[in-house]
Image (tube, rainbow, N blue to C red):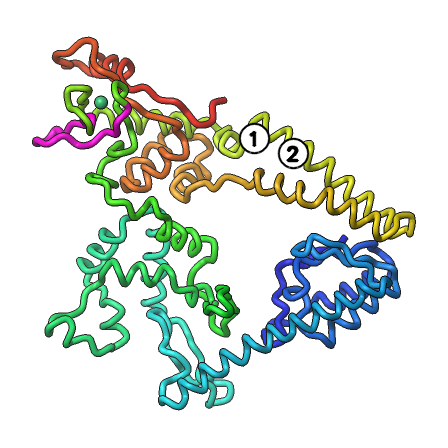
């Protein structure tokens, strides 16, 4: 079987389809029975390539399975052949519409005397040295470095207010200054500084991964741009998703400032923990009623940190985090059986031993359940901070401890959320002084209750 899922295929995309020749040979040599495409429109937008492909499949008795349609087509069947060609034409129509829109927008810009587009911070417009005419967008190294830093830090759950403050303290010119935008009026003569809004905007701008984003027919479309990306795609989406995560916007008091604030709970009544008023050393208290529980923050945080480091020093951690429970195992078995059934049906059809009607009935039975199982078995996402803690650490406790100590509180909280099912503080049984380290430790072991999400 042949899969094609990472090659852009728009008629107007500049990328070359080097794979076309390879696919052509595979089909002609009779190496495959079924060609799997994720979407006709994504796979082949050029009608003048799509038609010969369908013909080639018909000649070589190769079925075409389109994942997004959840259907297998037989190009030798008249109705399927018609559907396939119609799909190809629809796709090209869509592609032309997109291109027309982009061109219209560019024309409008030209009329207003604007350059190609106002470049985002991190880029500048230059004249292409190749033809001395075309305007191209190129990264500005020192700005690109800041973009990289900001997006990486957001992906690591650094609070955006802290990032803005840090950039201002380091005297890094803000985008408005760097781009020479006329913002003097708004900032009343003062130099415009970095703001959380600027950082949020930056983390949402797909220009940094070399793409354009626009909405067409109510759908968001990401199209390839012609410029060089600045930021790694995976990192970018991590940052962008974090910022659009609704839980991040809730403004609970003390949120993100303390390790267990509104994350750990009171063992007596189940309310969250909050910081108790008063001076250093700070204490956590039950947010509902401080007569439930209070406990020293520095000791508790140290204890939790040590739990995490010891846990991460065990090399099985990734296995555990991505481990499947028994229900998942049953799903995997079922999924494999259904996929095998589907492959068998496709094989039989390819050999002419199964009617098209029988195949489509079989697919109606199999495909919805396959989709359901695939959805349920989606891999868990492991936060960036956890990756950073354990990467190449070889289970070395000292290394992990040093990295944990260097993490910002929000990143630590991300790690806790991934590792723990619950952390709660019990009422003290032996109130009074804890003078020696041993007494403190005993008190913590007695009072800090926790449950791991993935027990070995
Ligand atoms: Zn309570």
Q: Is residue 257 above or below residue 132?
A: above
Q: Is residue 248 above or below residue 196?
A: above
The answer to whether mark 1 and mark 2 are in CB contact below 8 A is yes
Assess disc 2: are there few (<14), some (14-19) or many (≥20) residues with their C-alpha within 10 Å of its C-alpha.
some
* Disc 1 secondary structure class: loop
* Disc 2 secondary structure class: helix
- Which residue is at a point 47% across and 57% down the rendered structure image? 233
Residue 278 located within the stretch drawn in magenta: yes
- Which residue is at a point 36% across and 28% down the rendered structure image? 308
Disc 1 Cβ-to-ligand 1 distance below 8 Å:
no
- Residue 297 visible? The answer is no
Q: Position of residue 93 (x, y in %)?
A: 63, 75
Stretch of the chain drawn in magenta = 270-286
Tell me, for residue 332, which label it has, or none: 2
Tell me, for residue 93, which label it has, or none: none
Residue 295 located within the stretch drawn in magenta: no
Tell me, for residue 324, which label it has, or none: 1
Instruction: Name the residue furthest top.
Output: 430
Assess disc 1: are there few (<14), some (14-19) or many (≥20) residues with their C-alpha within 10 Å of its C-alpha.
some
């Amino acid at each position: 079987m042949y899969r094609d899922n990472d090659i852009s295929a728009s008629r107007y995309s500049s990328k070359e389809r080097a794979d076309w020749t390879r696919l052509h040979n595979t089909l002609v040599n009779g190496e495959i029975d079924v060609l799997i495409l994720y979407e006709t429109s994504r796979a082949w937008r050029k009608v003048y390539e799509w038609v010969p492909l369908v013909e080639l499949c018909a000649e070589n008795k190769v079925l075409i399975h389109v994942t997004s349609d959840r259907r297998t087509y037989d190009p030798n069947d008249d109705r399927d052949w018609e559907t396939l060609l119609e799909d190809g034409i629809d796709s090209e129509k869509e592609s032309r519409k997109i291109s027309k829109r982009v061109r219209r927008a560019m024309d409008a810009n030209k009329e207003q005397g604007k350059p190609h587009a106002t470049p985002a911070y991190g880029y500048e417009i230059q004249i292409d040295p190749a033809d001395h005419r075309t305007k191209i967008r190129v990264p500005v190294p020192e700005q690109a470095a800041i973009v990289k830093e900001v997006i990486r830090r957001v992906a690591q759950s650094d609070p955006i207010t802290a990032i803005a403050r840090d950039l201002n303290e380091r005297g890094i010119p803000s985008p408005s200054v760097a781009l020479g935008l006329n913002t003097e009026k708004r900032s009343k003569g003062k130099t415009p500084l970095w703001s959380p809004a600027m950082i949020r905007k930056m983390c949402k701008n797909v220009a940094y991964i070399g793409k354009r984003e626009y909405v067409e027919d109510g759908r968001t479309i990401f199209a390839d741009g012609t410029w060089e990306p600045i930021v790694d795609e995976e990192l970018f989406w991590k940052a962008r998703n974090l910022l659009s995560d609704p839980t991040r916007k809730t403004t609970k008091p003390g949120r993100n400032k303390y390790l267990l604030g509104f994350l750990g709970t009171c063992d007596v009544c189940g309310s969250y923990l909050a910081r108790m008023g008063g001076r250093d050393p700070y204490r956590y208290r039950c947010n509902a009623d401080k007569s439930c529980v209070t406990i020293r923050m520095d000791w508790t945080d140290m204890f939790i940190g040590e739990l995490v480091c010891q846990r991460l020093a065990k090399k099985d951690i990734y296995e555990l985090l991505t481990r499947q429970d028994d229900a998942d195992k049953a799903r995997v078995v079922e999924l494999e059986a259904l996929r095998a059934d589907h492959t068998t049906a496709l094989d039989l059809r390819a050999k002419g031993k199964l009617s098209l009607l029988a195949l489509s009935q079989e697919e109606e039975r199999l495909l919805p359940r396959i989709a359901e199982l695939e959805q349920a078995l989606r891999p868990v996402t492991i936060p960036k901070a956890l990756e950073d803690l354990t990467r190449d650490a070889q289970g070395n406790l000292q290394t992990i401890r040093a990295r944990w100590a260097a993490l910002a509180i929000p990143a630590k909280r991300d790690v806790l959320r991934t590792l723990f099912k619950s952390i709660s503080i019990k009422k003290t049984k032996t109130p009074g002084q804890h003078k020696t380290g041993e007494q403190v430790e005993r008190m913590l072991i007695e009072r800090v209750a926790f449950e791991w999400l993935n027990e070995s």
